[in-house]
Image (spheres, rainbow, N blue to C red):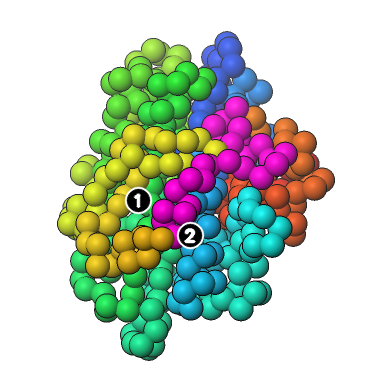
Amino acid sequence: MSLTAPQWLEKIRALPLSSKVKIMNVCGGHERAITMAGLRSVLPAQIELIPGPGCPVCICPEEDIYTAIQLALKEKITLVTFGDMLRVPVNVSKKSARSLEQAKAMGADIRPIASPLEALQIAQQQPKQTIVFFAAGFETTIAPVAALIAQGIPNNLLILLSGRLTWPAVALLLETGVAFDALIAPGHVATVMGAEEWQFVVEKYHLPAAIAGFTPESLLAALYSILRQLIEQNYFLDNCYPQVVKPKGNPTAQRYLSTTMMIVDANWRGIGMIPVSGFSLKESQADARVQFPDYAQETRQRRGEMPPGCDCAQVLLGHIYPNQCRLYGNACTPRSPVGPCMVSDEGACRIWWAGGVR
Ligand code: SF4
């Protein structure tokens, strides 16, 4: 029998919680659902829900955005990318474009798209023009890119890939002692990669974990599971999104990923290098970095720093809440964002601001 959100809340409130419990989520969709439903304000005060590195646009390294800007401005290519990426700022000299949006205003042909299929359609409509698809995202976004490549793309479509795997970031947080007591594991990622991928949280780090969907009911069910596990000191990985998340995930999507991509160490903006956390293309013919090596060389010097005064790195690591940044709501708002966490729909700062948290 499935319970309603008020019924789950009642069960959670009835649990004998003695001390503070910090529970991290690593998915912008989870953070959005938690914030928009106002879950923090109705849960017992001992429960802290911490947003972690769940925004692929926020952790996309400056060097990748800089490469995209330079390609679009200097090589007369058409650059297509998911809309969130257009306004993400990078630190460059005042004379250069500080975002893809500014590069577009300077005359570059940059177009927002909503799906990889649109990139293919644009390439097919303009066979004489080089189209570069700047694809940044986690497993759920990169799997359709892999499918596109595996099924064959035209020669004039190149990929500038900035894909990341989620679990190595959580492993890094746990390895470096970022304090949380339990994990809400990302439902969409588990749909693709399989629930088992999150078993390491329990087995290696001895913490409770539960995979959640994106409704308040599913999130509260996951929270209830985690809290009971803590109270009973019996930790396991609970799949609270069984309608969608299946054991072993989506084998077709995984096959596309493994045939087109390698797993490599990768830089996360604000966090740094994380071992085995990035996707890299196997096929150099389609790789914009291989086809335009000068730009990749130039930008490899840049590291994942945030704009001056922006605490996005601390937010992504779960060290502070968005509204603990000094710029939140003052110098930094969605209308005038300073850091990537206020730009992307999956950024914690933007979500908190949209949810009315001041
Ligand atoms: Fe960065 Fe703005 Fe968030 Fe502060 S409020 S951490 S400046 S994005």
At 28% from the left and 21% from the top, the residue drawn is 203
Residue 294 vs residue 209, the one in the foreground = 294
Residue 200 vs residue 152, the one in the foreground = 152
Instruction: Give how far across and how far down residue 165 sits, in percent.
Output: 36, 44
Residue 358 vs residue 241, the one in the foreground = 358
Instruction: Give how far across and how far down residue 213 sits, in percent.
Output: 43, 46
Disc 2 residue crowd, few under 14, some 14–19, many 20+, Cα 10 Å: many
At 43% from the left and 41% from the top, the residue drawn is 267
Amino acid under disc 1: Glu
Outermost residue to the right = 330
Element under disc 2: helix
Q: Which residue is mark 1?
A: 139
Was residue 314 drawn as part of the magenta stretch in this picture?
yes
Question: Does 176 appear above or below 278?
Answer: above
Q: Quadrant of the N terminus?
A: top left
At 54% from the left and 14% from the top, the residue drawn is 16
**Is residue 271 among what the camera can see?**
yes
Q: Quadrant of the C terminus?
A: top right
Left/right placement of residue 222 relative to residue 331 reads left
At 75% from the left and 52% from the top, the residue drawn is 333
Stretch of the chain drawn in magenta: 295-319
Does the beta carbon of the residue at mark 2 sit less than 8 Å from ligand 1? no
Disc 1 residue crowd, few under 14, some 14–19, many 20+, Cα 10 Å: many
**Is residue 32 among what the camera can see?**
no
Residue 231 vs residue 343, the one in the foreground = 343
Do callouts 2 and 1 mark residues in contact (Cβ within 8 Å)? no
Instruction: Give how far across and how far down residue 30 sits, in percent.
Output: 51, 44
Amino acid under disc 2: Thr
Left/right placement of residue 189 relative to residue 349 reads left
Mark number displayed over residue 124: none
Q: Which residue is mark 2?
A: 67
